[in-house]
């Protein structure tokens, strides 16, 4: 993907979360069923890195389930990180740290070079990163940060399984782009919420399929331990994967 196109797609999401962070956060007041299913298998004492931690609801749920390890949450939205810190400020059983970091930058991991983790999570994040090579570089870094036999838990949006969300797909021409500018699966969606008084936001999303994820795991040295669909009215709005770094 050309650098200019990649930057334009990244800016779409940066602008969205800058303008709509508050209303978006209200739609994420509880963890999705798929995340809850994974939490039940997360060991209580663990060193966990959460990429794209958002408003911190995942950490809050971890604490409620008895998690007592250490947690590092990274996100590029200062507004969402402020929500995360406020939501979890009373937790005493978990050593937590929040950092404002943009995963699309080449050196986002500079402050983590001497740290290793038992678990890395990234829920509803990978599909917002354009360029297959950028995503591969990110996952290679995740592999590096994990301890032997560590687990990478993540989800990707399957928005075409929702009739309502399929209606939100916009043509690339609406932002002076063409399908030839982007990669297969790249999609432009609109966002609407009552709290935003009718304002319409835009989001870039990449639609993953199972063969694509299988190839990505193989290319980055991971073994797929399990995968399943969950969330939404039909229970198939997100695809969850558990990858393991064989030690």
Image (spheres, helix red, strand yellow):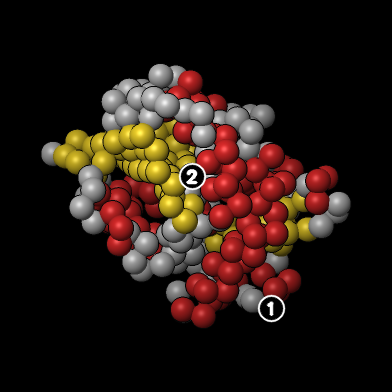
Question: Residue 131's image quarter?
Answer: bottom left
Q: Position of residue 234 (x, y in %)?
A: 63, 29
Q: Nearer the viewer, residue 216 or 72?
A: 72
Compared to 48, does 4 lie above or below?
A: below
At a point 60% along the width and 30% down the height, the residue shown is 30
Is residue 230 visible in the rendered image? The answer is: no
Q: Position of residue 73 (x, y in %)?
A: 43, 45
Compared to 57, does 103 lie above or below?
A: below
- In which quadrant is the C terminus drawn? top left
- In which quadrant is the N terminus drawn? bottom left
Q: Is residue 89 left or right of residue 169?
A: left
Pointer 1 residue: 176
Q: Nearer the viewer, residue 227 or 65?
A: 65
Dot placed on the residue nearer the N-terminal end, 1 or 2: 2
Binning the other alpha carbons within 10 Å of mark 1 as few (below 14), some (14 to 19) or many (20 upward) gives few
Residue 87 bears which disc, if any? none
Compared to 15, does 209 lie above or below?
A: above
Q: Nearer the viewer, residue 108 or 245?
A: 108
Which of labels 1 and 2 is toward the front? 2
Q: The residue tagged with tag 2: helix, strand or loop?
A: loop
Q: Position of residue 177 (x, y in %)?
A: 64, 76
Pointer 2 residue: 53
Q: Residue furthest left?
A: 247
At a point 72% along the width and 42% down the height, the residue shown is 163
């Amino acid at each position: 993907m050309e650098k200019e196109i990649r930057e334009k797609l990244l800016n779409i999401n940066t602008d969205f979360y800058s303008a709509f962070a508050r209303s978006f956060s209200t739609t994420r007041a509880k963890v999705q069923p798929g995340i809850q299913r994974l939490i039940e298998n997360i060991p209580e004492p663990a060193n966990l890195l959460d990429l794209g931690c958002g408003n911190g609801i995942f950490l809050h749920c971890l604490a409620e389930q008895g998690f007592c390890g250490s947690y590092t949450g990274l996100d590029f939205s200062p507004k969402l990180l402020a929500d995360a810190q406020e939501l979890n400020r009373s937790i005493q059983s978990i050593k937590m740290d929040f950092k404002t970091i943009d995963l699309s930058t080449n050196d986002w991991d500079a402050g983590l070079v001497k740290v290793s983790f038992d678990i890395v999570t990234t829920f509803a994040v990978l599909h917002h990163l354009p360029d297959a090579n950028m995503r591969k570089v990110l996952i290679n870094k995740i592999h590096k940060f994990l301890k032997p036999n560590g687990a990478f838990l993540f989800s990707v949006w399957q928005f075409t399984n929702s009739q309502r969300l399929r209606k939100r797909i916009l043509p690339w021409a609406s932002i002076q782009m063409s399908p030839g500018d982007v990669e297969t699966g790249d999609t432009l969606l609109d966002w609407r919420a009552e709290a935003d008084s009718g304002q319409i936001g835009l989001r870039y999303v990449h639609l993953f399929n199972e063969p694509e994820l299988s190839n990505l795991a193989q290319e980055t040295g991971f073994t797929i331990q399990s995968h399943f669909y969950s969330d939404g009215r039909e229970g198939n709005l997100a695809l969850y994967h558990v990858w393991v770094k064989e030690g």
